[in-house]
Each structure stands twice: as structure tokens, then as C-alpha cells.
Amino acid sequence: EAGVAQSPRYKIIEKRQSVAFWCNPISGHATLYWYQQILGQGPKLLIQFQNNGVVDDSQLPKDRFSAERLKGVDSTLKIQPAKLEDSAVYLCASSLMDRTYEQYFGPGTRLTVT
Amino acid sequence: KNQVEQSPQSLIILEGKNCTLQCNYTVSPFSNLRWYKQDTGRGPVSLTIMTFSENTKSNGRYTATLDADTKQSSLHITASQLSDSASYICVVSAYNTDKLIFGTGTRLQVFP
């Protein structure tokens, strides 16, 4: 079974530039999550999709962050414009939403904003 | 407030030695507790998951314990290997929700 795929793996941009990350979840997983993990901290949930609908985006900085999940499969997360404090690893996870609520994480995209 | 705290923040041990990582939580109502291993540059990978009724679970050289009364968990690593160098994150779920509450992790370094 293929895992969660993310790209790019690394990205370096200057502040005020835009950036987009892509995630392909495990086949058949209806639920998709985007997390932000700042160095030395645990992941923080940014947004959760159930199929192509948003379930929770309460911690998404909507003035600069946006996300979509077209056709309920792949998802993109965009930052526009980026700030220095956006430097972090952006993790995508997917879940079957069975009774274990197990989430499977991708390798992440490491973003550095200079 | 639902919180998960881990100790120590970082740990250095020699290859072949054992170590124990600690996790305290205040999540209520409790559903389950997971330990994840996160290698540098990779996403977290689940090692163990325990529900309220379970007080120990093993996965190879990793053994997790849970005391639901004191809201404490530990992860014991036996005969450490260089490949055990990683961050270990304790994650707790509240009952009937998929939201995960993450600890800040323990950074383990194993030296030869």
C-alpha cells in the first residue's frame, strides 16, 4: 500500500513570496489533514477535509493560508504572502475514519522563509 | 485545557543501552494514547496505540505503558540501536473525536 505522498520535500522562498504544497493521500482515505510543525514543537492542525468539504479550519490563518481538496483526493495548501514565522515542516496526513481514527503521515515539506 | 507534556526534552545514550521516555496528559475524556517515532526529515510513524483498558503494549524493542489513573505513559526502548535516533512524540485522543493532541516530543540520540 502506497503511503501519503507530498511535494516538494524542501522549499526556500523569500518573505512576501507565494508557495504551494501538494498532498496525495492513501487511496480510499476520505479524511485529509494539513499540519504545521515548527522546529521543536508538535504538529498543529491547520485544516481538515472530509472528502472535498472542510471539517475544521479554525486554526488556519485565513488571511494568508488557503487550502483545497479537488474531487476529494489530492489537496494543495498555499501561503500568500509568506512570513518569516511560516518557516516550518508542513505535514499532510490521511485517515479512513474507522474506529481507531489512525492517521498516516506523509514525509512533509520543509519550508524556509528568508 | 487538554495538554500533553513529555520529558525529557532530549536524551543522549550509548548504543545497546536502555532508556525510558515519559508522557503526562490532561486530556479528558480519554480515548487512546499513541507513541509516534519521527525520523529527521520524515513524518511521524505510529509505534503503539493504547486504549483506556490497556496498560502495556509492545512493538519489538519498544514497550509502552499506560496508567490511566495517574494519566501517565512511558515508552521504554530496549537495547538501543543507532537507528533509534529520532524524535518520539506522545499523542492523545479524546473520546469520540479524531483530533490528536500532540506532545512536543523527546529528541533521542544514540551514539556508538
Image (cartoon, coloured by chain):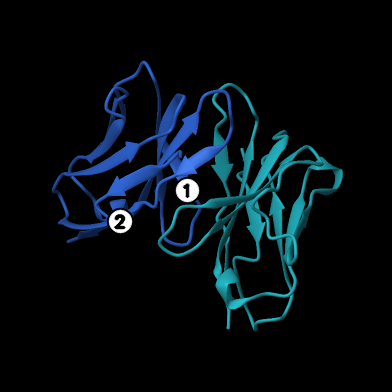
Is A4 rendered above or below residue B24?
below
Say the numbered circle drawn on residue B85. Answer: 2
Amino acid at dot 2: Ser
Indicate the colour of chain B: blue
Gap between marks 2 and 1 measured at Cα: 13 Å
The numbered mark at residue B108 is none
Which corner quadrant of the image does residue A86 belong to?
bottom right
Which residue matches tag 1?
A: B44
Amino acid type at circle 1 is Pro
Q: Earlier in the sequence, mark 2 or mark 1?
A: 1
Residue A60 showing in the rendered view: yes
**Disc 2 and disc 1 on one polypeptide chain:** yes
Measured as percent of width and height from the top left, residue A43 is found at: 51, 52
Query: Residue B52 appears at what percent x and percent y?
Result: 39, 19
Return the chain for callout 1.
B
- Determine whether, in the image, residue A5 is placed left or right of residue B56: right
Cβ atoms under marks 2 and 1 closer than 8 Å: no
Residue B44 in the figure: left or right of residue A10: left
Q: Residue at x 28, y 56 (%)?
A: B9
Q: Residues within 10 Å of mark 1 (few under 14, many from 20)?
A: many
Residue drawn where x is 45% and y is 53% of the image: A42
Residue A52 placed where, x, y %? Answer: 82, 41
The color chain A is rendered in: cyan
Whether residue B61 is visible? no
Neighbourhood count class around disc 2 (C-alpha, 10 Å): few under 14, some 14–19, many 20 upward: many
**Residue at coordinates 14% horizontally, 57% vertically from top-left?**
B14
Q: Is B59 displayed left or right of A28 in the figure? A: left
Q: Give residue B51's quadrant in the image.
A: top left
Residue A21 placement (x, y as % from top left): 70, 62
